[in-house]
Image (cartoon, rainbow, N blue to C red):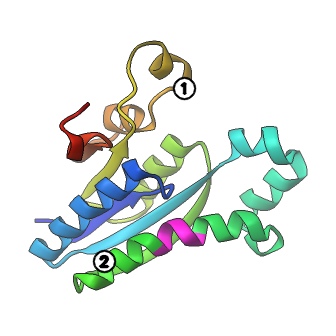
Amino acid sequence: MYDNILVPTDGSDAARNAVDRAVDLAAKYDATVHALYVVDVDATNLTLGTEQVDRIRQGRLDEMPEVKAEAEEATGQVAAIASEHGVRVEEHVSAGSPSRAIRKFVEDNDIDIVVMGSHGRSGLSRVVLGSVAEKVLRRTRLPVLVVDVHEDDGGE
């Protein structure tokens, strides 16, 4: 049923909950987990500047040790959890708008399901900040499992 499971990750608690669900699915279906870290170029542009964003887009993360370390830490967390359960994992780093980069990864790879975390924001904070999970959910044609960060504490 599932051969390739995509888990976008930023290393947050929301992403960690999604990783746990993705690894459970992968173990059940003998699937490969693809851990994807997206360097958000819009946010990076504000803090690092245009020159640094160009380096990221060109895949020159070796020239940006702090960004590379953050990406490796996030995807490494997925790899560590997956390996504890005997699940294959591939680590990927991309740059761009997170929702677009996730959708592009889905289009360019043989992904069967996306499992991703959500911070569970509502109201004005969701309108202002947007929701990557919601954008992916609305704009992809394959199953998307959204795991709320508050899932383990009863949603409170």
Dot 1 falls on a residue whose secondary structure is helix
Q: Amino acid at mark 2?
A: Ala
The rendered magenta stretch, by its main secondary structure, is classed as: helix
**Along the line of sight, the residue nearer the viewer: 124 or 93:** 124
The magenta stretch is: 72-76
Q: Amino acid at mark 1?
A: Leu
Above or below 118: residue 134:
above
Query: Is there any visible trace of residue 60 in the rendered image?
Result: no
Q: Is residue 148 left or right of residue 44?
A: left
Query: Magenta stretch: residue 123 in it?
Result: no
* Residue topped by disc 1: 129
x 10%, y 73%: residue: 28
Residue 82 badge: 2
Residue 83: quarter of image? bottom left
Q: Quadrant of residue 18?
A: bottom left
Q: Is residue 91 visible?
A: yes
Give the Cα distance between marks 2 and 1.
Answer: 30 Å
Q: How many numbered tags mark residues here? A: 2
Say if mark 2 contacts mark 1, CB within 8 Å.
no
Rendered residue at 22%/59% (across/down): 21
